Image (spheres, rainbow, N blue to C red):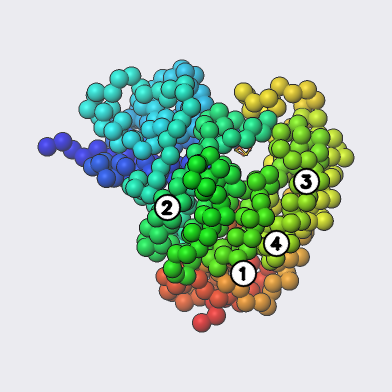
Amino acid sequence: MNQPYIVHVISLGCAKNLVDTEVICGGLATHGILLSAERDDADMILVNTCGFIEDARLEADREIRSALRWKKKGHGRAVAVAGCLPRRLREKAEELYPDVDVFLGLDDVGQAADVIRAFRDRSLAGRNLPPASMPTYLYDHTAPRLALTPVSYGYVKIAEGCDHRCTYCIIPDIRGRQRSRSIDSVVEECRQLLDQGRLELDLIAQDTTRYGLDRADGANLARLIEAVDQLPGDFLVRILYTHPLYLTDEILTAAAQAEHLAPYLDIPLQHISTPVLKAMRRGMDGPATRERMARLRELWPGVAVRTTFLFGFPGETAEQAEEVMAYCREYQFERLGAFAFSPEEGTPAATMEDQVPRAVAEARRDALLAQQQQLSLARNQALVGQRLQVLVDAAESRRDFLGRTLWDAPETDNLVHLRGPRDCLERGFVEVLVEKAEAYDLHGKVLE
Ligand code: SF4
């Protein structure tokens, strides 16, 4: 009898890539391939990469080279590379990594087990480099999936690909055109995750607000919110990765009225100055963006808004960067991230004139983060002495736990460090008395 084939999987990048990793792992596990948390027990290391920006590519390169060193140390060991990086590099991937045994394209996510079994059985032709054509794969609720997140939450990818053409972004070339799942499929997957005991469902896509618009059955995000909200039980739904251009009143009203929606919206704005937004091709100018954002506060009172800004886009002036700073003081975003522009090969922005020196972009980014830190500290200090509902994600010791308020998304936002009874993790939602505030994190004790 054949020895079982054992794979150690490393997942890099964002939550969208993590869902792909979960589907890859589900497929392997249901097709007789064993998964190991220890790489030295494995026959193969599979690195599911992100190739979005330079930092992500460097991280992927480090992991691949470390896996290749591991391969050299043991007879019969193999390395597979999946995800955005081989799709982005294409032929260059073979040259750069001649010792990688197998590549898995984005269309191979649902059939990773077949590819790996073919490799094991020596029937795979070549190294399975991803084709030049755009990927079209989209998983659904029938795809086996092995959860890799803590049990408190799970990601639900409602669409794949992107139809925007932001001039700094390579994602549409990597992930292909937008394709949305049916409402029924998403609701069924949500039901499965709730049956597993998950308490928070995080809806994700490249642009969740555009969900359904590529379908002919009338699906859209508002209808999806209403459908998921019908599911029974005590759980939260959180919407990540929205775009102001498609944030309609219909979506905002559905979100504000839904019983299970976390009072939270992730809406990356990238900039607020009209010339920069135009050069970024974000589809909206500054006044229209401000109007949408004001409408968001109006139609959904109490919502915590998370955004990100990108500094140092080609041609950005000091005054335009200051416009972002002033807008943030005015809007008082509850959660905020900032990045320095990195010119991505193959995007229009990479070859635009008036590139801003990296150091200038980073200084502008750091200035906004410093401003936000002060705002965040003041907001957190006002919470000391209050009772908050917290979702517990992890145990640090028998009495110490990590959780999040309803205003915080997993892996991105602030944490609550809490002391409480041993069964906090099993309880999931707990009530916490806030005792201490830092700029981002809170500390408190569970009220029993
Ligand atoms: S909306 Fe723009 S930034 Fe976001 S994935 Fe699409 S092209 Fe990239």
Q: In the image, residue 226 lies at what x, y percent?
A: 53, 60
Helix, strand or loop for disc 1? strand
Which numbered marker is on residue 184? 2
Indicate the quadrant where residue 39 lies.
top left
Kindly state the secondary structure of the residue where label 3 is placed: helix
Q: Secondary structure at mark 2?
A: helix
Residue bearing the label numbered 3: 288
Q: Secondary structure at mark 4?
A: helix
Mark 2 and mark 4: Cα distance apart in space: 27 Å
For discs 3 and 1, the disc positioned in front in the rendered view: 3
Neighbours of disc 1 within 10 Å: few (<14), some (14-19), many (20+):
some
What amino acid type is highlighted by mark number 3?
Answer: Ala
Circle nearer the N terminus (1, 4): 4
Q: Amino acid at mark 1?
A: His
Residue 434 appears in the figure: yes
Specify few, some or many for label 2: CA neighbours under 10 Å numbering under 14, 14-19, or 20 or more: some
* Amino acid type of the residue that numbered disc 2 sits on in the rendered structure: Asp
